[in-house]
Amino acid sequence: MHKLHCKLQSLIKEKGWDDLTTVQKETFTPIIEGKNVLVVAPTGYGKTEAALLPIFNIMLRNETKPVAVLYITPLKALINDITLRIEWWTSKLGFSVSRKHGEVPQKEKSLRLKKVPHILVTTPEGLEIDLDWASKFRENYRNIKWIIIDEVHELVNSKRGAQLSVLLERLKDFTNYDFQRIGLSATIGNEQKVANLIFGSSNRESKIVKVEGARDFEVKILKVKQKEGEDLWGSTAKLVNQLVERPTLLFTNSRFSTERLYEELERSKLKNIFIHHSSISKEEKIRVENNLREGKADVVICTRTLELGIHVGDIKKVIMYRPPPTVSSFLQRLGRSGHTINRVSKGEIVCLYDYDILEAISLYELAKAGIVEPPKSMPYMDVVAREIIGITLQYGEINVEKLYNLITKSSYYKGLKFDKFLSLVKYMIQNGLLKKENYKVKIGKTFFKIWRFDKDNKITWMKDFSEFFSFISTDETFNLRYENKTIGEIDAVYVYKHLRNNDIIRISGKLWRIVNIDINKMQVNVAPATSGNGEIPIWKGENISKSSLITKQIEKVLHNIDDYLYGDDSLIDEESKNALNKLVEFYRIHQLPLPNTRTIYIENENDEIVYATLINEKIANTLSHALLYLATKKYSLNVSARSSIYGFSIKGVDKDLLQDLINLDEKQLKSLLIKSVKRSPLFFATLKEIQYSFGKINKVSSEDKIILEEALKQTVNKYFSIKGTMKYVKMIKEGKIRIININGLSPLGKAVLSHSPIKPWISDLSIRIYQALKGGAYTVEELSDMLGISKKTLELRLKKMRKPSSKYRTCNFIDVDTHETRWVLMEDLKEIAESDDYYNSFNPINLDESYVMVMRAYQSEGATESVFRVKDLVKNPEEFLKRIPYDEILELKLKDPNDSLVASISPKYYFVKKSIARFLVLNAISYIQNLKFG
DNA sequence: GACCTGCTGCGGGCTG
């Protein structure tokens, strides 16, 4: 080992450290030797110092010009934390450090120009700003010798990771120096891939330093026992109460559970309980963190916010309320306790349902075996587009080959073809985001249209200039409006997935009925409702997806279930054993194989067909969307579907639609899967998120191929699996996956039903009109307002929808009170006509009159006239029907041989179906009589 | 009952 500089040795003594940690020792030499190093170890193993000590060692022996070290970390809170930690060293070594993020006061930020720091701590976005925009400070970057990337596992899977990788290549080109790259990561699968992603085009030798430590932990899995007269929350709180050893971190998977558990625990004898999640104010979060560090907290109930980064002091125990969604998250949460290296992490998983126990055991086994989710990278094209802009901002003008060379140095974009890159640049020029001048590109006008410096009078699509530097999209929300007042906000994806007209929701204790959803104005109009079980739309539409490792592991756990039930290890408690015993018993009694990935159970419950099996969540999601697509296309719009790692389901059709999927050939299947993804709100949301990066301001049309293709790729990558689903269906076809019909509901089927259903979201105009009209009668003006579509377009479409060939047929009547034409769905006309709302429009005043009904047949030459008494029409509808010889009437109107006025004022109805003709005739009479006598 | 993350630089001119 290289010798530690004497100054560092004495500082280590001053710190009170006996020795360096294993990570610090193992990292020292490779860094001194100039290698790129990826350090993999749990939080709290001293990774920051592991990277910095050897760098200080070199800095002390050589003259170093600032900025020598760039320290990148994904969180502002971490920047603050780490800057203080580094300052302890630098102040004593004669170096300086400064930090830069959005909340650092302007005064502090501007200091770095006067006194350039040796070490700069910032975010990927901070580096983006400096390279693109900070023309003066940027010059100091030319001296950079080391880059440390902290929390690499957090970055690599996202657009931020792709962005950073391009930034590093830009920096390398700018400095003209192959600086040393050091990555610090929590436990992650496939370290080599992670290393490749961050080392990029560097020619240095590289080394991965991995410290196992994560495997020394104690885990106990417990199931909540629900006591009589107590709800699950109360029982959970009681159990948690028994488990707490101060200080305890109690992790949950939702902000809602955090609040709910707090409420329950507050009633217990526990004192000093705190809450920590993203909706808690910044000040409060800092207060909680301080209490935790100072040992003043008994329990902190938190979401993932406390999984990442910051130092929280000595934690005695970690309790996870319901299993976390990934092994990586499980390890991170667990690693929050027993920090000081030699102490073992202690954790407990509190389960609510039998499948929670299976997930918990699986997480434990995977973690013990050292199997963790691998990184997942993809070449996001919106990142490329923005980096092109960034580079152009940096240089003012630049030629396309140079741009291409810079970007494809990044490991994320190695495979990007020049053709594709060129068509992207052309498209950006076409949208005015770039302009071409003498074989070079410059910034175009559209850039300043989208990312604005002036903060006032912004149109909704305009963005603040600062947003240009970040790829974290703020969630879109719908305003909830009643009588021109905004009464709340709902996450857009939640609206797309779950809310439809006439649904009842509950906000701040009141019930509201959805009147309509205006996606152009991003408004949900509501009216007070008096009854119904309102759902509470508080959570974000995004769901946390479960690792596919868990699915496969559950299969293994079930295979060896007896070891868990009868073995003597103390992993799971008695209550859990009972629950698992019951689960297993169901299958044994019915002589069915235990749940596995090769058997699908088809089950039935309340008009819902459940396909229960152990399945990759993305495949389940793809299948459920495909079923929704088929169902809405062939049968009904009133359907919903669910998906999870326990299977999928469809409600509202009594056909086995999976069979329809299986019967398709490969090409048909693929095209159907793509169509169903494209119709999902997730695709829609992705489209909206990325379109501005390409300079597209208006609605994306079929000509914007680049955006459409990219949105599809990103949506699939995140939520679906086309290839996986193709393979899955093929396996069913080949009999490699068995299908078994069972009566009733299996435990697995119950698990499927415990996930909330999604409803189809339709962008097709006719279907949207259908959804808007459903249950009501509206004028073209009202509909135009509701849907944000021009009156002319709307009227044309409404007329077209009257025809028998239309799937969702409409018709119109005259509102006798206002003399306006109102449109309704043909299927709703009866109900509307019989309702009190339009009483005057369908109830003639004088029953003693007689009229002649004039009809022309649809699609034939026929025409008929028929005399009738109003009284007969009202009293004897059956008889009246017999007077209509056509199933479909092309034109329907009234006349009176004794009064020519009638023919001239009679409304005319087109494309009338026989079954509803009576109501329209009633409407015509009501209108005529209203004019005559009214 | 469904998570989390980030976000203008520079320098001129004014006030007390």
Image (cartoon, grey):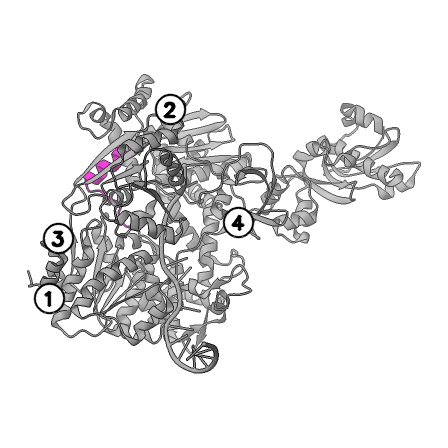
Q: Are marks 3 and 1 on the same chain?
A: yes
Q: Marks 2 and 3: in contact by CB < 8 Å?
A: no
**Above/below status of A400 relative to A823:** below
Give the label on residue A746, or none: 2
Viewer-side label of 4, 3: 3
Task: Please report whichever mark, 2 or 4, sits nearer to the chain's N-terminal start.
Answer: 4
Camera sees residue A736: no
Q: What amino acid type is highlighted by mark number 2?
A: Ser
List the residue tagged with mark 3.
A21
Viewer-side label of 3, 2: 3
Q: Which residues are magenta?
A: A358-375
List the residue tagged with mark 4.
A478
**Above/below status of A534 relative to A35:** above
* Label 2 neighbour load within 10 Å: few <14, some 14-19, many 20+: many
The chain containing the residue under callout 3 comes to: A
List the residue tagged with mark 1.
A7
Q: What amino acid type is highlighted by mark number 4?
A: Phe
Task: Please report whichever mark, 4 or 3, sits nearer to the chain's N-terminal start.
Answer: 3
* Label 3 neighbour load within 10 Å: few <14, some 14-19, many 20+: some
